[in-house]
Amino acid sequence: MTERDTIARAAVDVIIPVYRPGSWLQACLASVGASVGVETRVVVVDNSEPDDPPVQRPALVGLRWIRPGRNLGFAAATNLGIRLGNAPAVLCLNQDARVAPDFLARLAPLLLGDPTVGSVSGKVLRVSGPIDAPDGLIDTAGLQMSTGRRAIDIGQGARDDGDFDGSREVFGVSAAVALYRRAALEAVTESGQVFDERFFMYKEDVDLAWRLRRGGYRAIVDGSAVAYHGRSVARQDFLPGRFGSIRALIQQERGKPAWARRLAWRNQWLMVVKNERGADVARSALDYVVRELSLLGLGLMIDPVGTVGVRVKLLGELAEALRRRRKAQELALADISDWLP
């Protein structure tokens, strides 16, 4: 057996956080169970509330089902699952995602064969149902950091016409379907947390991608590894001077639940305060200002109390964000200015 074969057969801890799981989870677990060339150890962290009806747990050899008794959120639930394992590779998987049988076998050698690689993923195609065929469109081919420090999913909405079949380095990968090197996660852990649990959900994977980059780890997407994802909310970028983008921003914000709108805004700024270098701010200052004024004006129109309240609340959270920022500066090993337009 070659060294590559040995690496490919390494164990993978698969962490699937769920909340009131529905019809998607069975297909998700079945896809992991059908994986070839690797040993998988699956942990489902069920965030259902105490008074929610019991869930029929799917049959899967070796499945570990944890129910904390309250909704921990994506970040804390995933951290709990990660702590329960010890495999050198960790697959974070949304319950509305599934992987091709050879997905992990293709990516494990790429991740574990190069100590500078901290995260990998494949070409993730969009699906509309748990067992539906893909609709021919890309869901994500990695994360790209755009102006104003907005993360977007590369290729999202584009036709799967072969442009995303190769292997390329990216800023980071979406935690909907992401394979991480455990040693890299441990190297950038903050206060015992891989994903920042203050985020609860939304943008915690971008924050982690940023920390991995600053820690000197690369992220790779290999289009030969295929996965599928049913996404309810897309990551989009809105640039100043593009009226179509502004209209799209208004439509997107109006379509979000109020709590999600507030949480996404707050997490965006926690992420920026923690990770942004002062030397890089000038290049995106205009985009910061334009987007913030746009979101503020829109928020005051559709949710004035929540818009003001979340901004006041953020002031009380800045001290901890700044503390983590100082610690991150001490641990930073790489200048990633080229990844921050």
Image: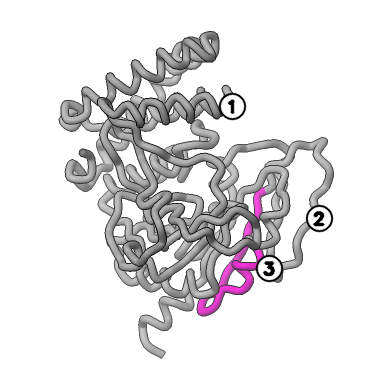
For the residue marked with disc 3, what is the amino acid? Answer: Gly
The span shown in magenta is: 29-45
Q: Which of marks 1 and 2 is in front?
A: 1
Say whether marks 3 and 2 touch (CB < 8 Å): no
Q: Which residue is drawn at 41% across and 49% down?
A: 156
Q: Which residue is drawn at 37% across and 64% down?
A: 161
Q: In this view, does 208 lie to the left or right of 35?
A: left
Question: Pointer 1: what residue?
Answer: 257
First in residue order: circle 1 vs circle 2: 2
How packed mark 1 is, by other alpha carbons closer than 10 Å (few <14, some 14-19, many 20 or more), is few
Q: Where is residue 153 in the image (x, y as percent from the top left)?
A: 39, 47
How packed mark 3 is, by other alpha carbons closer than 10 Å (few <14, some 14-19, many 20 or more), is few
Q: What secondary structure is marked by label 3?
A: loop
For the residue marked with disc 1, what is the amino acid? Answer: Pro
Position of residue 331 relative to residue 283, above or below, is below
Position of residue 286 relative to residue 210, above or below, is above
Position of residue 285 relative to residue 217, above or below, is above
**Cα gap from disc 3 to disc 2, whole angstroms:** 16 Å
Question: Pointer 2: what residue?
Answer: 56
Determine which quarter of the picture holds residue 48.
top right
Instruction: State the quadrant of the C terminus.
Output: top left
Q: Which residue is drawn at 52% across and 67% down?
A: 12
Q: In this view, does 255 lie to the left or right of 151?
A: right
**Cα gap from disc 1 to disc 2, whole angstroms:** 29 Å
Question: Pointer 3: what residue?
Answer: 62
Instruction: State the quadrant of the N terminus.
Output: bottom left
